[in-house]
């Protein structure tokens, strides 16, 4: 029996066992449940699904990821970003909150599972890298603005009106005279409790205290009888496993929703898992985590709830509480199970304004003020990308925001490679060797020899700039350029268009009698040049491992050429 157990695969998130630390993990799991249960209930306000579906995201999905995933730290459950995507992409197909709409959110989760498994098979985990950090800051901040603005009417006891953040805020401000003081007082009370607990001790479950206190007040003061909106009956017991039923015309919207969630899950979950693996010097296994995320979303879709994602905030909750393995998450799932079995009755008396306040704070917390400020100070062009993403997500929608973020990130990368850093080698003033300086006229590495460095892959978009800059330097009047060293140690790839441009450059320089030398330590680079017909014999050059070696060889070659010409 022991031999059989040893052969069974051991969940990387649970194994090796934490030993004495398992008690700390259990306590961390209880802390996670206390902090996250009100939060996931709030996410249902964003996704427009029944309150109980938020609890479901912390049951089977969390259990499945703990068994299949590799990360010992990543918490997988409901997430505000994917919840916002669901209502933005599916809200026009079925009435939000209706049974057909819930079926669509379940189908989206199942389809996300399929996309994630496909990503594992095709090894598409690298796609997460196409959403830059600045774009991700903008995306999550935009969702935060969208979520917070959407809950403003709920804080005032008003129905939600308007499309886009600007209209929603304007509508709420114009209807301030119609706001209900009882809803506002409840919202302010919840806000005070949560903020106060956070200032006293960040580990205090302020949201849970606010939820429990408001339910108690609701019972004592008969909030429903006084006209305050409450959550209403919440079904108890275990979720039923059922495959979602979607009509054929609805699959297009489900596909768009799932694809949008898939991109966010790839970027957010991968980034979070990597960060905590690095913090504890553990190996990050992205493909295994994708399998765990696929299993978690499949479990979500079959158990009546919506898309789940790796949550940075919940992961930090567990880490701050001392949790160091998925045992913490199993403990949290057990607490949720107890709530579903025995404590859903009191949730019916929970004032709706409480959830609106919790969701409003979640939205505000999602706005990455620190990240935006850092981008403004350090990288203005990436700040523009983040700001454009924020505005697009908040005003137009999540899917256009994701598309814009990816496109702008790719454009920024192309811009970097289109206008890469170039420089010239020249002797130091103290004669101790060479150093690089910005490209300028009159800068030589040796008498009559120019040493030019290009720090990017050479491809169709920047090959013409490369050729023009080299020709302009080689054509300096009165400089007497006879030799050119191309420092290609920063070039790791040459495409067809760039190779053709190099052939033309070679011929032009050859006509001017300029000798060439190439500096590279990459055998693959040399083979690539040969393949395109740029062999060293035809270039009349040699390949060297360093710029000083190339300069010495060219100096000797020019000296011999000068001696031959003199004879």
Image (tube, helix red, strand yellow):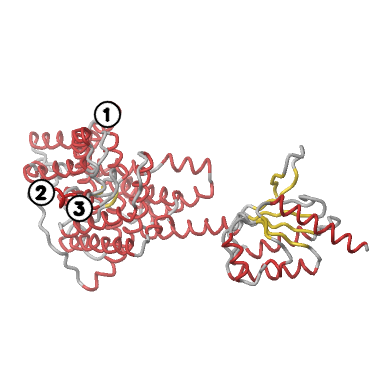
Residues under numbered marks 1 and 3 in contact, where contact means CB atoms less than 8 Å apart: no
Above or below for 76 versus 104: above
Which SS class for mark 1? helix
Q: Earlier in the sequence, mark 3 or mark 2?
A: 3
- Residue, disc 2: 234
Q: Residue 511: x and y, percent?
A: 79, 69
Residues packed near mark 2 inside 10 Å, few (<14), some (14 to 19) or many (20 plus): some
Label 2, label 1: how far apart the Cα atoms are? 29 Å
Q: Is residue 152 visible?
A: no
Earlier in the chain: of badge 2 and badge 1, it is 1
Secondary element at tag 3: helix
Q: Neighbour class for label 1 at 10 Å: few (<14), some, many (≥20)?
A: some
Q: Name the residue under label 1.
A: 196
How dense is the environment of label 3, judged by Cα within 10 Å: few (below 14), some, or many (20 and up)?
A: few
The residue identified by callout 3 is 7
Q: Can residue 365 be seen in this view?
A: yes
Query: How many badges with numbers are in the image?
Result: 3
């Amino acid at each position: 029996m022991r031999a059989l157990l040893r052969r069974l695969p051991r969940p990387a998130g649970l194994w090796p066992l934490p030993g004495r630390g398992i008690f700390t993990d259990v306590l961390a799991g209880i802390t996670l449940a206390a902090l996250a249960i009100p939060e996931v209930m709030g996410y249902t306000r964003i996704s427009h699904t029944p309150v109980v579906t938020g609890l479901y995201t912390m049951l089977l999905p969390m259990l499945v990821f703990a068994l299949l995933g590799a990360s010992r730290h990543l918490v997988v459950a409901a997430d505000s970003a994917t919840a916002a995507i669901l209502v933005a992409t599916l809200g026009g197909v079925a009435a939000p909150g209706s049974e057909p709409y819930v079926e669509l959110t379940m189908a989206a989760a199942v389809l996300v599972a399929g996309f994630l498994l496909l990503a594992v098979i095709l090894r598409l985990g690298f796609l997460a890298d196409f959403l830059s950090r600045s774009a991700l800051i903008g995306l999550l901040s935009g969702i935060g603005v969208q979520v917070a603005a959407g809950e403003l009417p709920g804080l005032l006891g008003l129905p939600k009106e308007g499309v886009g953040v600007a209209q929603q805020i304007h509508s709420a401000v114009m209807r301030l005279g119609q706001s209900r003081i009882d809803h506002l007082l409840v919202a302010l009370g919840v806000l005070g409790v949560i903020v106060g607990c956070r200032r006293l001790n960040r580990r205090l479950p302020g949201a849970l205290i606010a939820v429990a206190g408001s339910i108690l007040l609701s019972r004592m003061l008969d909030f429903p009888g006084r006209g305050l909106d409450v959550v209403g009956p919440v079904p108890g017991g275990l979720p039923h496993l059922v495959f979602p039923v979607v009509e054929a015309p609805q699959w297009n919207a489900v596909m768009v929703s799932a694809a949008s969630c898939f991109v966010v899950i790839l970027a957010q979950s991968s980034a979070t898992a990597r960060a905590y693996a690095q913090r504890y010097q553990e190996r990050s296994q992205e493909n295994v985590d994708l399998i765990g995320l696929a299993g978690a979303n499949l479990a979500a879709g079959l158990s009546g709830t919506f898309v789940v994602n790796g949550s940075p905030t919940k992961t930090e909750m567990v880490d701050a509480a001392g949790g160091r393995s998925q045992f913490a998450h199993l403990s949290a799932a057990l607490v949720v199970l107890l709530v579903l079995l025995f404590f859903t009755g009191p949730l019916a008396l929970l004032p709706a304004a409480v959830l609106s306040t919790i969701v409003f704070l979640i939205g505000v917390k999602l706005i990455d003020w620190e990240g935006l400020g850092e981008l403004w100070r350090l990288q203005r062009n990436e700040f523009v990308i983040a700001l454009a993403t924020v505005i697009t997500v908040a005003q137009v929608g999540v899917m256009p925001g994701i598309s814009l973020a990816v496109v702008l990130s790719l454009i920024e990368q192309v811009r970097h490679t289109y206008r890469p850093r170039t420089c010239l080698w020249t002797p130091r003033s103290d004669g101790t060797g060479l150093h690089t300086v910005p490209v300028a006229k009159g800068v030589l590495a040796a008498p009559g020899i120019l040493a030019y460095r290009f720090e990017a892959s050479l491809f169709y978009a920047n090959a013409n700039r490369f050729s023009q800059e080299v020709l302009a330097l080689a054509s300096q009047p009165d400089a007497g350029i006879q030799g050119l060293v191309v420092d290609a140690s920063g070039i790791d790839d040459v495409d067809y268009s760039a190779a053709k441009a190099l052939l033309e450059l070679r011929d032009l320089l050859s006509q001017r009698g300029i000798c060439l030398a190439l500096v590279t330590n990459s055998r693959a680079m040399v083979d690539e040049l040969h393949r395109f017909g740029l062999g060293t014999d035809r270039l009349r050059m040699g390949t060297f491992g360093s710029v000083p070696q190339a300069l010495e060889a060219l100096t000797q070659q020019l000296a011999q050429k000068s001696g031959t010409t003199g004879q």
